[in-house]
Amino acid sequence: MDRFGLPARVDIDAVVANSFKDFHTKGFDYLCVRRSPRETLKLYFFDGDVSKLPEVVSPHDHRYGFETTILAGESQNVWFAEGVRGGDDPRGGEVFNRFEYRTPLNGGDGFRWIGEAQLVETGRRGFRRGQSYYMDAAGLHTIRIVSSETVLMLRQFEDVVPIDRPTTTFTKGAAPSLDGLYSRFTADQVVDKLRLFEERTGIALQSYQG
């Protein structure tokens, strides 16, 4: 393992089985280089127009707690808190549509509108190579990519929300489209992505098949 806790060698077949292109939005790809119920490691890449968006995905919570480490480039994390609509919070807040989300990756049917909510942005911070931050499952956030060369490592911990319960996403308009998302890598594409990972981070991950 290197100082970030990455495995020295990765099984290409296992990476293919557990990784996705266009995850949640076009150009947001990840390679899963370790997977277990207790800890999963994912490498996030942001190519094309996704690196220019004001936010990569809509504010949301998670099924699990996680730690994000920046391995190349720069990313911003933006924290939110849910307020009381019509309240007098001096920080203000905006009205969002609230959706339950059941991921198609686990057989779910995507987004279901359940009402409106007021969100207040409570913090925004930039992180560079070697820096990390932690989010618990209930925390609301989104991210912004500052550099198109950015690579993030997500250390995902054990699920605390059961698989049959939804997570929550907040949008300013309609639910995001899921059309054309969640496609698979081929083995050759994984090898190419690992080369790109080494170019951007200086970290070499040896790979094998079988």
Image: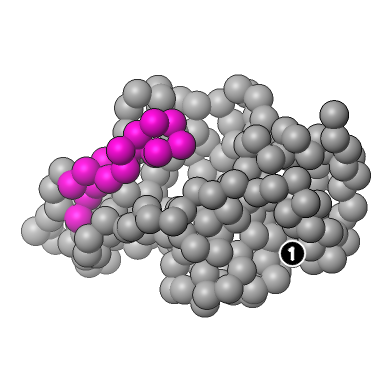
Residue lying at 40% horizontally and 22% vertically, measured from the top left? 162
Marks counted in the figure total 1
**Residue depicted at x 58% and y 53%:** 21
Residue 135 is situated, as x and y percent measured from the top left of the image, at: 51, 44
Image location (x, y in percent) of residue 59? 37, 55
Q: Which residue bears the numbered disc 1?
A: 72
Q: Position of residue 29 (x, y in %)?
A: 60, 55
- With respect to residue 169, does 18 lie above or below? above
Instruction: Locate residue 177 relative to residue 2 in the image: left or right.
Output: left
Above or below — where is 124 with respect to 175?
Answer: below
Q: Is residue 109 magenta?
A: yes
| Picture residue at 49% right of the left edge, 63% below the top | 26
Question: Which corner quadrant of the image does residue 19 belong to?
Answer: top right
Measured as percent of width and height from the top left, residue 175 is found at 26, 56
Task: Report the quarter where the N terminus lies.
Answer: top right
Residue at the outermost left position: 86
**Left or right placement of residue 61 versus residue 125 in this view:** left
Visible in this render: residue 132?
A: no
* Location of residue 127 by image quarter: bottom right
Question: Which residue is at the front of the view, 140 or 90?
Answer: 140
Circle 1 — which element? Answer: strand
Q: Which residues are magenta?
A: 97-113
Along the horizontal axis of the image, is 208 left or right of 57? right
Residue type beneath disc 1: Ala
Q: Quadrant of the C terminus?
A: top right
**Residue 14 or residue 8, whichever sits in front:** 14
